């Protein structure tokens, strides 16, 4: 959250938290107020948008026109695409994101997964090697050419992101670990932030793939799927498909093995 506040313009920035994805929005909203408050950021608003009628609320629309950043909470990412898709609310957010350099859109868990145009909304990790077990739909569409998955290591989701990329090889897969994120600027340059690991899955150079030819329920096979691991400060260029050992000068903290 510290980096979100920093990128939004500092502790005095106006940040609207959108709790649509959660089934316990008021509890989640209070948690965000407390978390932001602990780092000195108190200019926080809560948008408890529960349905498409709420998304058309004039007050909410006015608030997102003037805030410095929005944060989408976790929960169920399908609730976000079903509730916000095609609304003026979402159109305003997209326009501001595309045209205003300092406007920030952030998301955690389901909120992060909904950022892209192609979105995983369901998929049991233990069956993700089988065709058809990973469900994909259209997300909020703030960024193209990526597919984002969360709780990546803790819930063993490599297989489902691999299948999603195999079915959409023009997309870069981004697997987010716990307490970890990707800062994406200009829709292209990514920088890993947080204390954990980000996994990049690149399917552009896939050679053999059986996913189009096998019946559902059968194991997929893929050749030449590329994988990169990113710690804090590493980066990646989406369009160039290039790994950056250092996203920007000084972004990686030097570490060295002690030798006695």
Image (cartoon, rainbow, N blue to C red):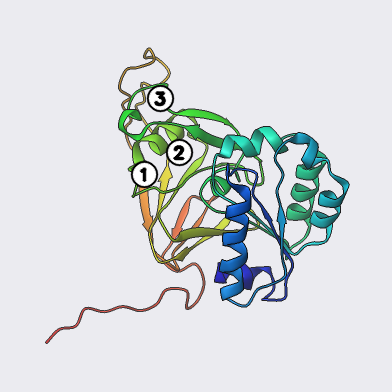
Residue sitting at x 34%, y 27%: 208
Mark 2 in CB contact with mark 1 (< 8 angstroms): yes
Numbered mark located on residue 133 in the image: 3
Of the 4 image quadrants, the one containing the C terminus is: bottom left
The residue to which callout 1 is attached is 226
Residue at mark 2? 204
Q: Is residue 14 left or right of residue 57?
A: left
User: Picture coordinates of residue 218 (x, y %)?
Assistant: 32, 17
Q: Point out the tag, 2 or 1, that comes first from the N-terminus.
A: 2
SS of the residue under disc 3: loop
Q: The residue tagged with tag 2: helix, strand or loop? A: loop
- Find residue 53 and report its image quarter: top right
The quadrant holding residue 219 is top left
Q: Nearer the viewer, residue 26 or 46?
A: 26
Q: Quadrant of the N terminus?
A: bottom right
| Marks 2 and 1, how far apart at CA | 8 Å
Residue at image location 49% in from the left, 43% down from the top: 172
- Establish if 182 lies above or below 19: below
- Residue 73 at x, y percent in the picture: 59, 51
């Amino acid at each position: 959250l510290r980096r979100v506040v920093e990128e939004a313009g500092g502790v005095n920035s106006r940040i609207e938290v959108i709790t649509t994805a959660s089934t316990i929005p008021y509890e989640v909203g209070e948690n965000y107020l407390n978390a932001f408050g602990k780092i000195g950021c108190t200019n926080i608003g809560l948008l408890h948008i529960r349905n498409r009628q709420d998304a058309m609320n004039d007050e909410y629309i006015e608030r997102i026109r003037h805030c410095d950043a929005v944060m989408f909470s976790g929960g169920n990412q399908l609730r976000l695409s079903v509730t916000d898709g095609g609304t003026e609310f979402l159109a305003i957010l997209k326009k501001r994101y595309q045209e205003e350099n300092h406007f920030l859109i952030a998301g955690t868990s389901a909120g992060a997964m909904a950022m892209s145009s192609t979105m995983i909304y369901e998929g049991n990790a233990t069956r993700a090697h089988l065709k058809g077990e990973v469900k994909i739909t259209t997300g909020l569409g703030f960024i193209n050419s990526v597919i984002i998955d969360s709780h990546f290591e803790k819930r063993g989701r490599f297989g489902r992101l691999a299948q999603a990329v195999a079915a959409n090889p023009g997309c870069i897969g981004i697997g987010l670990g716990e307490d970890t994120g990707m800062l994406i600027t200009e829709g292209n340059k990514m920088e890993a932030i947080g204390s954990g690991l980000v996994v990049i899955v690149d399917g552009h150079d896939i050679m053999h793939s059986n996913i189009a030819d096998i019946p559902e329920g059968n194991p997929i096979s893929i050749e030449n799927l590329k994988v990169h691991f990113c710690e804090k400060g590493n980066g990646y260029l989406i369009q160039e498909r290039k790994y950056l050992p250092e996203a920007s000068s000084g972004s990686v903290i030097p570490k060295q093995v002690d030798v006695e």
